[in-house]
Amino acid sequence: MLGDVNWYKENLAADFVCIESDGAILDKQQFLINTANGPDVAEYKLQDVNIRIYGIVALVQATGLFIKKDGSKGLSRYTDVYAKTGEVWRAVSAQITRTSRLDTANDSE
């Protein structure tokens, strides 16, 4: 299954930046290319989503449990920053941290 490139094209700001777990910095175009290649995990379950709005800025933080294609499990945490221009919210920044360490309190399945 491939990522929803069109959704990201529409909802990422032109100057969007993503900082990945390995320290790589992706601009919007690089992020869209990665998205078009599809996920590098077999399963992903999002949980603990927290949204805070401060005027025209919003922070979205969440935890995800994932299973890689080789069967190994991991946990990710991310923060997305959205800015509102007029009536439109666009993501301007994302930071993702992945680990193979599982938060066992949340891995009850």
Image: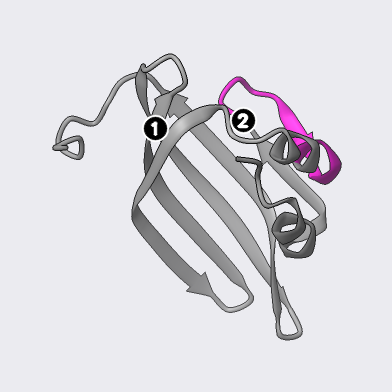
Question: Which region of the structure is painted magenta?
Answer: 20-31
- Picture quadrant of residue 67: top left
Q: Which mark is residue 66?
A: 1
In the displayed structure, 36 sits above or below 57; it is above
- Picture quadrant of residue 84: bottom right
Which residue: 60% across, 20% down? 22
Q: Is residue 22 magenta?
A: yes
Helix, strand or loop at disc 2?
A: loop
Q: Residue furthest bottom?
A: 87
Could you tell me the amino acid type at mark 2? Answer: Glu
Q: Give the percent coordinates (x, y) of residue 15.
A: 84, 52
Which residue: 44% across, 23% down? 68
Q: Which mark is residue 22?
A: none
In the displayed structure, 17 sits above or below 59; it is above
* Dot 2 or dot 1, earlier in sequence: 2
Which residue: 56% across, 26% down? 21
Q: Give the percent coordinates (x, y) of residue 40.
A: 57, 27
Give the quadrant of the C terminus. top left
- Picture quadrant of residue 56: bottom right
Which residue: 71% across, 85% down? 87
Q: Nearer the viewer, residue 32 or 51?
A: 32
Q: Which mark is residue 20?
A: 2
